[in-house]
Amino acid sequence: MTANAGASPVIALKSVTKTIGDGVVTTLVRDIDMSIFPGEFVSITGPSGSGKSSLLYLLGLLDVPSSGDVFIQGQPVNKLDERARAHMRLSLIGFVFQFHFLLPEFTALANVMLPMRALAELDQHAMQERARTLLASLGLHDHMNKLPGQLSGGQRQRVAIARALANTPKVILADEPTGNLDSKSSEQVLAIFRRLVDETGSAIVMVTHDLELAERADRHVRIVDGRIV
């Protein structure tokens, strides 16, 4: 699926640069213009240290630019305070990382419910039913009450994807989501992402070192030395 014709971007970066350091300044991303549209699957590749993850953190409001502007659904977000940014992240953006970051003492079901508890828009029954539906849709019907330590790597990553979907995000940002998985589990994750784009209209942005996976996205963006090339 490609971006809807005439649709407005879910996220847009305009002339965004991110630097760190006071004396010796390091530029992580430089003068980036980028728009992510509904129903679009975008992959980002580049050498280690090229700025891929820095770009993803800017897209996900986990970091703020040194210059330039970030827009979420057309709204400028640079000047929002951290509380407002956190609410926007929670309600509009889902995250999947290389390391699943599931809480080991919570079951798969409880882990998926965590973002819903934080957003506090559903009652207990509705949260539980949504978590069950998400896990079942990812083939985890029989694993809902297991702890992360009782699941395989691929199963844990699928729980993490269900958690990312908990609040019905407009965009899912995935940082090396297949980095710790075998080839079969990697294929499962890619198939899940493709299905989510096609069935829900959510956008997915995936940072990956795997060029074969990257080329199967709708759009492949390459970044070198902080610039899109």
Image (tube, grey):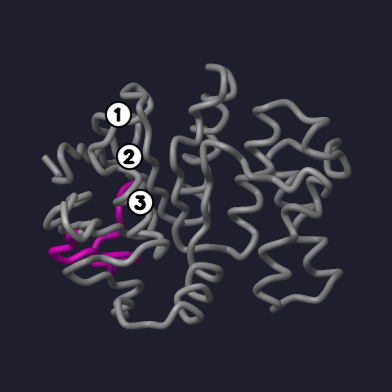
Which label sits on residue 215? 1
Which mark sits nearer the N-terminus, 2 or 1? 2
Mark 2 and mark 1 in contact? Answer it, CB < 8 Å.
yes
Tell me where the magenta segment starts and ends, as one range: 1-17
Q: Nearer the viewer, residue 36 or 227?
A: 227
Mark 3 and mark 1 in contact? Answer it, CB < 8 Å.
no
Q: Nearer the viewer, residue 50 or 130?
A: 50
Which label sits on residue 56? 3
C-alpha distance separating marks 2 and 1:
8 Å
Answer above or below: position of 211 versus 20.
above
Q: Residues within 10 Å of mark 2 (few under 14, many from 20)?
A: many
> Element type at marker 1?
loop
C-alpha distance separating marks 3 and 2:
11 Å
Which mark sits nearer the N-terminus, 3 or 2? 2
Q: To which quarter of the image does residue 91 belong?
A: bottom right
- At which x and y percent is residue 168? 58, 63
- At which x and y percent is residue 209? 35, 27
Residue highlighted by disc 2: 43
Q: Give the amino acid at mark 2.
A: Ser
